[in-house]
């Protein structure tokens, strides 16, 4: 097989795989899966969000979110409470026993490690370019 140049797509896939692999190792120590840890951090950033809002934020289907929430509730890490304004819907909260601090700390460590040695002006350009690429990818996925 002939050598071919590494594309931006390849680089992005490699980066995301490496980050996900490191994250999965960390969350396993906390008796979590990657998906449950993502949900925990999303609830932590959006306390009281509805199940539909959380599913949208994570870009997953509501039944998938329900299964993840069932597991987090069984672990005592999250709880659903009926919304006073609409008894058919639930708001989701972390419990007092939630082990989210290590997850947030790890996210901060990864963020710091990723930008180490990168000049601030390059970071700003990178953020703009990645945001544009995300918008382009979203457009492609709708076509």
Image: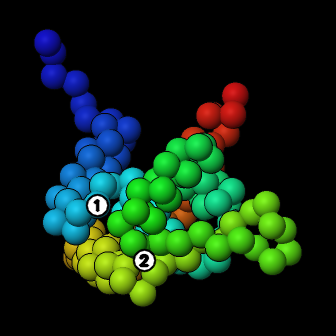
The single residue placed furthest to the bottom in the displayed view is 96
87 sits to left or right of 7: right
Secondary element type, mark 2: helix
Counting from the top left corner in percent of width and height, residue 57 is at 60, 59
Q: CA distance from mark 2 to mark 1?
A: 37 Å
Q: Nearer the viewer, residue 94 or 7?
A: 94
The single residue placed furthest to the top in the displayed view is 1
Q: Nearer the viewer, residue 92 or 38?
A: 92
Counting from the top left corner in percent of width and height, residue 65 is at 54, 51
**109 shown above or below 136:** below
Dot placed on the residue nearer the N-terminal end, 2 or 1: 1
Looking at the image, which residue is at 23% across and 56% down? Answer: 24
Q: Nearer the viewer, residue 26 or 36?
A: 36
7 sits to left or right of 128: left
Q: What residue is disc 2 on?
A: 121
Query: Which mark, by number, is residue 32?
Result: 1
Counting from the top left corner in percent of width and height, residue 83 is at 76, 73
Query: Which mark, by number, is residue 93?
Result: none
1 sits to left or right of 24: left
Looking at the image, which residue is at 54% across and 64% down? Answer: 128
Looking at the image, which residue is at 24% across and 31% down? Answer: 5
Number of the front mark, 2 or 1:
1
Q: Residues within 10 Å of mark 1 (few under 14, many from 20)?
A: some
Say which quarter of the image contains residue 28. Answer: bottom left
Counting from the top left corner in percent of width and height, residue 131 is at 56, 58
Secondary element type, mark 1: loop
């Amino acid at each position: 097989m002939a050598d071919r140049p590494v594309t931006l797509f390849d680089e992005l896939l490699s980066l995301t795989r490496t980050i996900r692999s490191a994250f999965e190792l960390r969350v396993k120590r906390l008796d979590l899966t990657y998906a449950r840890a993502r949900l925990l951090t999303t609830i932590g950033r959006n306390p009281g969000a509805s199940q539909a809002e959380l599913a949208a934020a994570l870009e997953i289907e509501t039944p998938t979110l329900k299964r993840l929430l069932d597991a987090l509730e069984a672990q005592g890490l999250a709880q659903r409470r009926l919304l006073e304004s609409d008894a058919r819907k639930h708001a989701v909260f972390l419990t007092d026993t939630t082990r989210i601090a290590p997850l947030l700390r790890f996210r901060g460590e990864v963020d710091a490690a990723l930008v180490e040695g990168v000049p601030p002006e390059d970071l700003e350009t990178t953020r703009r370019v990645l945001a544009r690429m995300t918008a382009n990818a979203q457009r492609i996925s709708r076509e």
